[in-house]
C-alpha cells in the first residue's frame, strides 16, 4: 500500500518576486527574493503582513520562534500549525494580536512510501495557478541583547487525498483570492471562521527526483516529473 508521510508540510517552492507581486502587491515592498525550489524550515521566506494598517512584503524566518524563546532560534517551534492549535499558549498572543500573514508559494512537497520500501517525493500544486498564497502566523522574538528574530509558520488544513486512492496528505491553508484581504484585516474571530470554512483546493501531484532530499540541490529540475 502506498501511503503519505503523516508529517506536515516541510518543503515548498517560492515563486519569482514579480509573479508574487502580481498575485498580491503589498503597499510597501521591503522584501527581496528569487525563486527557490527546495525551501526548508530555517530559511527566510517572503511574507505579506500588516503594519500600521498597510500591507508590507517582508522576509521572515520559516519556523515559529516564540516571544518566550527570546530570539533563540535553537528553540524554534513548528513550521506548520494545525487549526486545533490556535489557542496554544506559545502563539496565542500572536493570534490575538492579529499577527497573520500571507506566504507566497508555487506548490509543496510530500512523500509516499512505495512497495520497494523507499519514500518517493511528490510535487503537489494547484492546476491553473502558478502562484498561491497560504495563510500564516508570524511572531517577533527579542533577545536580552536586543537581537530580533521575526518568524512565521503555515496554517495547515486537515489532511486531504492527493490523487485517486491515495492516503491523506497534510496541506497548507491555501486561500482563494477573495480571502486575502479578510485574512489580513479581519478580527481573530473572523480569521478563525475563515480557516474553519476554507474549502480544500483541487490538488494534483507528480513524482519528482529524490534530489529534493538534499538541501544543497535547488533548481527547477526538482519539480520536473520522473517516471
Image (cartoon, rainbow, N blue to C red):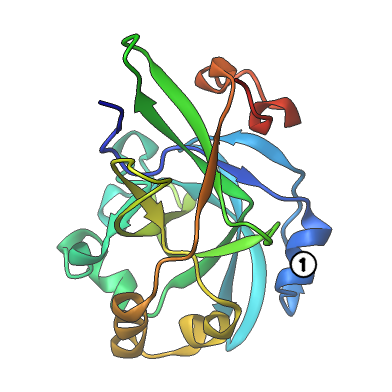
The one nearer the camera, 213 or 116, is 116
Q: In the displayed image of the protein, which residue is found farthest to the front?
A: 164
Residue 91 image offset from top left, x and y in percent: 26, 63
Return the residue nearer the eye: 67 or 20. 20
How many numbered marks have been drawn onto this rendered protein structure? 1
Which picture quadrant has residue 41? top left
Query: Is 142 situated above or below 54?
Result: above
- Is residue 5 placed above or below 141 in the rendered structure? above
**Does residue 144 appear in the picture of this structure?**
no
Quarter of the rendering containing residue 199: bottom left
Q: Residue 186, can we see it?
A: yes
The residue lying at 67 percent from left, 61 percent from top is 129
Q: Nearer the viewer, residue 22 or 51?
A: 22
Across and down, in percent, residue 102 comes to 54, 67
Question: Among all residues in the image, which is located at the extreme right?
Answer: 18
Q: Is residue 137 left or right of residue 196?
A: right
Amino acid at each position: 500500500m502506498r501511503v503519505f508521510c503523516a508529517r506536515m508540510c516541510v518543503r515548498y517552492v517560492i515563486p519569482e518576486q514579480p509573479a508574487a507581486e502580481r498575485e498580491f502587491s503589498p503597499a510597501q515592498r521591503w522584501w527581496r527574493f528569487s525563486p527557490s525550489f527546495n525551501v526548508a524550515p530555517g530559511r527566510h521566506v517572503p511574507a505579506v503582513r500588516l503594519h500600521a494598517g498597510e500591507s508590507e512584503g517582508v522576509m521572515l524566518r520559516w519556523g515559529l520562534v516564540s516571544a518566550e524563546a527570546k530570539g533563540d532560534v535553537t528553540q524554534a517551534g513548528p513550521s506548520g500549525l494545525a487549526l486545533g492549535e490556535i489557542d496554544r499558549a506559545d502563539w496565542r498572543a500572536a493570534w490575538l494580536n492579529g499577527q497573520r500573514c500571507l506566504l507566497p508559494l508555487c506548490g509543496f512537497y510530500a512523500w509516499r512510501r512505495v512497495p520497494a520500501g523507499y519514500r518517493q517525493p511528490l510535487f503537489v500544486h494547484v492546476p491553473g495557478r502558478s502562484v498561491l498564497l497560504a495563510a500564516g502566523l508570524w511572531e517577533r522574538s527579542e533577545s536580552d541583547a536586543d537581537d530580533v528574530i521575526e518568524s512565521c509558520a503555515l496554517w495547515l488544513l486537515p489532511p486531504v487525498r492527493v490523487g485517486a486512492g491515495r492516503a491523506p496528505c497534510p496541506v497548507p491553508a491555501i486561500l482563494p483570492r477573495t480571502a486575502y484581504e479578510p485574512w489580513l484585516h479581519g478580527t481573530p474571530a473572523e480569521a478563525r471562521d475563515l480557516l474553519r470554512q476554507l474549502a480544500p483546493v483541487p490538488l494534483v501531484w507528480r513524482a519528482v527526483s529524490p534530489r529534493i532530499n538534499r538541501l544543497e540541490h535547488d533548481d527547477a529540475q526538482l519539480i520536473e516529473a520522473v517516471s
